[in-house]
Amino acid sequence: MLSKLSMQTRKERELLEQIDHERLPVHVAVIMDGNGRWAQKRGLPRVAGHRAGITSVRKIIEASAQIGIQYLTLYAFSKENWQRPAGEVSYLMGLIEEFVLKELDTLSKNNIRFKVLGHMEELSANVRTRLEEAIHKCQANTGMWFNVALNYGSRVEITDACRTIVRKIQQGTLDYAEIDENLISDHLYTASQPDPDLLIRTSGELRISNFLLWQLAYSEIVITPVLWPDFRKQHLLKAIIDYQTRERRFGKVINP
Ligand code: FPP
């Protein structure tokens, strides 16, 4: 066990040496996928994959903060996920509640800031209370932002922004001429946060799945075949190394 641990650390150290710390992605977003398949491969119920996925969540938050990532956004539950079997939905909600309860002290001690992206008011009172406690407890922190996208849908987020903007115009607090891309960004759930530089999707699927559609306009995308419950610091490091090989042009020609 110990030798496995030290081998893993050596691997991580080798990967860390390949990273240019001056060019880290500021914001990393992750579509955590493959929990069900991870469980299926082991002859376990799907929810066992979600439980195993929690270990990855913990490890990736810790690794991201260590590496110096400033914003980490994890896609935990989409608006569309309510259509899963009721037992799976309630298990997932229970896991999220349990995670916040167990990890809150650690998150707070590690100076991590916490934000929920999504409609919290539609969650059960228990889950909502836990999340509100966490937001409150972490509000004075100054370290990495951990965003959890929960009951989240990007089209709903953009629709919410449109509604708020129109209401402000009707109330006379905003002029139509002031609408520009920055103003729209400022009305999304991620207001005041930079757009993700890097999007990671696990389990090999090639989809965005209604996640941060506006914010991902110029993000670099890394798809890994690794299933989320197997995703560890070394996979995050590999994704960052891959990201650092990309030439980010934002639509421009670099050397005309
Ligand atoms: C996708 O796997 C995963 C999810 C829908 C849920 C992910 C959520 C967690 C790991 C809990 C998150 C908790 C916190 C606190 C961030 P899938 O079930 O769609 O897998 P499959 O495609 O293999 O079926």
Image: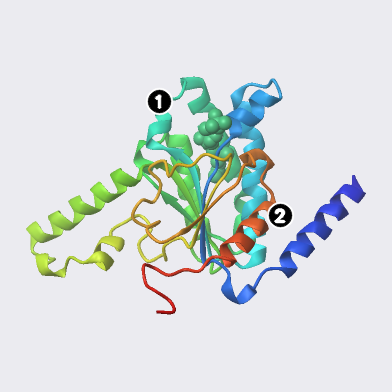
Where is 241 relative to 121, above or below? below
What residue is pinned by disc 2?
Answer: 234
Residue type of the residue flagged with mark 2 = Gln
Question: How far apart, in angstroms, are the residues tagged by discs 1 and 2?
Answer: 33 Å
* Residue 84 spot, x, y in % from top left: 45, 24
Farthest residue, direction front: 256
- Residue under the image location 36 percent in, 51 percent down: 213
Determine if residue 97 is in view.
no
Residue type of the residue flagged with mark 1 = Gln
Which of the 4 quarters of the picture holds residue 227? top right
Residue closest to the eye, 204 or 10: 204
Along the horizontal axis of the image, is 83 left or right of 37? left
* Residue 57 spot, x, y in % from top left: 61, 46
Write down which quadrant ligand 1 falls in.
Answer: top right
Farthest residue, direction bottom: 255
What residue is pinned by disc 1?
Answer: 83
* Residue 111 spot, x, y in % from top left: 59, 64
